[in-house]
Image: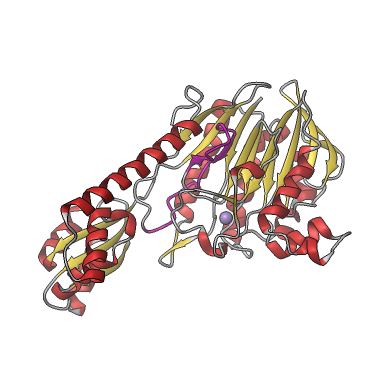
Amino acid sequence: MKLLHTGDWHIGKLLADKSRLEEQRIVLDELAAMADKHEPDVICITGDVYDNGHPSARAEELFCSTIKRLCKGGERLVVIIAGNHDQPQRLEALQPLAREHGILIFGNPNSKPLPGKYGNYEIQPLDGGVFRTRAAGEEAVFACVPYVSEKALGEVIYRDLASEEENLKSYQEKMRRLYEGCNVWFGEDTLNICLSHVFTVGYEGDSSERSVQLGGSYILDADVFPKNADYIALGHVHKPQKVAGTGGRARYCGSILPYHSDEVRTPKECLLVQLEKGRAPQVTPLIFSNPKPIERWECRGFSEAEALCMKNQERSCWVFLKIHTEEPLREDQIRRLKGLKSDLLEITPVFPDMEEREEELRPLGERDLLDLFRSFYVNEKNREPDAEILELVKNLAKEEGEERKDEAANADDPGTEQL
Ligand SMILES: [Mn+2]
């Protein structure tokens, strides 16, 4: 069976108050063309199709026309779960119309579809979020676990036995129960696919996903997912990656566009997944174009900025511009730059006394560990650390780095993908 895994479309999301709808239209058009080219049997959309619960009419039009193209008149099964940005009931409201196109929509973990034909597919509901079907000549069980808040999760799982003790269990333990509940439907002779919208330990994010993360309590260990799942299609994290410790079974496909102003280089993709019982999933990323990249420019003085804006006038890009200057920029200079380069989203002057301060404020990951240690030591002891201590710190850092490399290597499943 061939799956196409996509998610985190965030239709309607703004960048510094500017609409990205035209870029989203281009990339979703590419997605539909990829589906036509590679002919997956099933398309999994793993949440956050919209950026908020009350999308604009144009956003809804883009969503509806895209899933209409993806389902190919009921030939391909399209399975959609809600993310934290979607309004579950509103998404599900389309179900009566979507059904004949072979589209299934799950707003909540206990959403249960009606049995019968969905496009060309016969759907047999088994439990909340769980159904069985036959695709590409194979029997498959899908477990759809949309985003669920901790409060709602208590109601989903413990509505019959809401003892105080049960309610005190952590988000992770409740989610584990939920996935275990799915796992009982995963047979040894069926292809078992789980869809979910969650954070997992060690994920690499871009900080645009984090609106719901409360002190790490919403982050799950890799071992919570259903044991018998052949593939776990995840949404929520915007950088494509596999979840360490799952043998490449659990993946984030990432968002369709870079959404964070710091997100400059991550290529965006969807995942083509070939599933065969008893084998690791064969995953091929299909790369989207980046129709209008987000760029961060930095220059010295107004005239350098002016020249840069002039040179890049014709290029389509979003720009955050930083100008190192000794004098404040005048109103007419700012107007001039914005007139030269459209989509100049932000102009930040950096004055000489701010440069040093800026260095201190740089995110930790970008600073050399030894530098950090040195400034900490000087702060604490009022003197420079000696060579021996520095050597010790250096070795510790090296060991830590190697350990991480090992972990990454263990998580790797060579030969099953081209990343
Ligand atoms: Mn999300």
Would residue 243 be counted in the magenta stretch?
yes
Residue at horizontal 26%, vertical 59%?
373
Q: Which residues are magenta?
A: 240-261
Residue toward you, 248 or 306: 248
Residue toward you, 154 or 12: 154
Q: Position of residue 35 (x, y in %)?
A: 57, 32
Residue 134 in sight in this render: yes
Helix, strand or loop for the magenta stretch, by majority = loop
Which quarter of the image is occupied by the N terminus? top right
Q: Position of residue 71 (x, y in %)?
A: 67, 37
Residue 348 in sight in this render: no
| 163 relative position to 230: left or right | right
Q: Where ligand 1 lies, by quadrant?
A: bottom right
| 201 relative position to 312: left or right | right
Q: Position of residue 108 (x, y in %)?
A: 74, 54
Which quarter of the image is occupied by the C terminus? top left
Residue at horizontal 44%, vertical 39%?
288
Vertical relation: 100 (above or below) 168? above
Q: Position of residue 240 (x, y in %)?
A: 48, 42
Residue 328 lies in quadrant: bottom left
The count of marks equals 0
Would residue 293 be counted in the magenta stretch?
no
